[in-house]
Amino acid sequence: MHVEPVLTPRQQQAEQRRGKRRRTIIITAALVVAGVVPVLAYVLAGWSARHAAPVVQPSAPSIHQITSTAVVQPTASPHAMQPVVSNPANARITAQVDALFNNLVTQQKFSGSVLIAKDGQILLDKGYSMANWDQHIPNNPLSRFYLGSVTKEFTATAILLLQQRGKLDVHKSICVYVNPCPPPWQPVTIHEVLTHTSGIPELDTSQLSGASPEAWIASYDNVPLAFTPGSMFDYCSVCYQILGYVVQSVSGEPYSQFMQQNIFDPLHMAETGFDATFFYSQSIDANGYNTWQSSAEQLGWQMSPNWSFLFGSGLLYSSVGDLYRWDRALYTNVLLSQASRDAAFTSYTQNSLFAGSTYGYGWFIAKSPVPGHRLIWHDGVIDGFRTYIGRYIDDNVTVIFLSNLATVDSPTLAQSIQKIVFGQ
């Protein structure tokens, strides 16, 4: 039995709540930061450590490729990895997935970039429709998109890196690492924050106070938990901002700087970061659209690096190629040990937002169509963008698509791709 990500009415309501919570977090976080720096837009983007001091970088995992006649299109970047046909089975996948996305573009139901890989070889790496309609710039494999909640898997990895280095233990109270710590959080472990089972409620404007990260944390001093930690799953975006604060507190450096130096730089993810000014200054980067050709608000403002932990729940941007580098790294020890990867990909909940999926550390976990095999995945929902990465880790299949069209139903689209890849 494989995962069926089509949302039930109850799950649709949960997804709507997730979107409302995200907007609440973004807007209310803006009110906090407004006391420190001028707000440039109502949604978070970020400060970036792109030009931080060089660090020693291990070799990045190689990105193998094959060729495909379906990829050489006007929308494909001349600098992108160009696949070729290798065998009839892979050629069929390439042709059918390409046809699926071309059809969606014709129906004005998709705009973005797509990468499909199998057994370490890229089958499709292509852009569809426009990155910017006003400037007539097409999407291509190098286009960057805001990831939304796909950011969470990176924040979870930062926590696991710190645990590997002996600087924290996910099974200890979060208050061991947050000082001063809101009294209601004393029974909450980092594990429970990672798995959306902490009971910490989302922020609203009445809970925000002060003009420092410490004051932001202190706004929870008198806010009770919504439920007993570990007793239920309740998707919590602000919890991953709190985890970003833990990364910052334990590492002794801004969250965004830690991410740059310990994840993005080692993997040579040059198209990945948090700097909104850089993002919107590059012509190839995707502009977000609420509906076909109707622009969404631009994401981002500039702030002190010490506030960058607010990006931990959903304000990273990247490209399909960089996310494939990320995917390849997660098959190796280049970042995380086998024990840490096993911890990330273990199911800790009985349910989640989606039928057939549970939750690990920053990842939804479901079943591959192959009996006994797993699908490790996450979607992203943020103004003007819909994103998805699915890793069939026992089948060595990767599905990545990043869209700058907010009407895309990412889980349902992923299911359509899955049927093609596995010949269902």
Image (tube, rainbow, N blue to C red):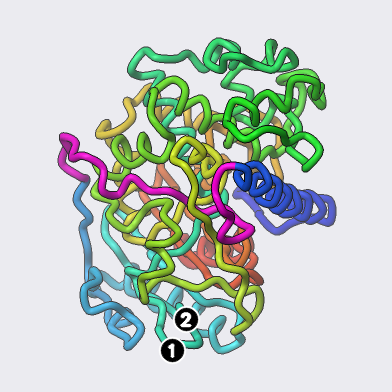
Picture quadrant of residue 357: top right
Instruction: Please identify the quadrant where the C terminus is shown.
Output: bottom right
Side (left or right) of 288 relative to 125: right
Contact, CB < 8 Å: mark 1 with mark 2? yes
Q: Position of residue 136 (x, y in %)?
A: 43, 89
Q: Nearer the viewer, residue 233 or 165?
A: 165
* Residue beneath the point at 31% across and 45% down: 264
Quadrant housing residue 331: top left
- Does 253 sit above or below residue 35? above
Q: CA distance from mark 1 to mark 2?
A: 6 Å
Secondary structure that dominates the magenta span? loop
> What segment is highlighted magenta in the picture?
36-60
403 up-or-down from 213: above or below: below
Disc 1 is placed on an element classified as: loop
Answer whether residue 58 is magenta in the image: yes
The residue lying toward the viewer, choosing from 3 and 290, is 290
**x and y, in percent, of residue 291 in the image:** 66, 78
Q: Residue at x 59, y 30 (%)?
A: 242
Residue topped by disc 2: 132
Residue 416: x %, y % from top left: 57, 67
In the rendered image, the vertical position of residue 72 relative to residue 191, given as above or below: below
**Badge number at residue 136:** 1
Residue 319 in magenta? no
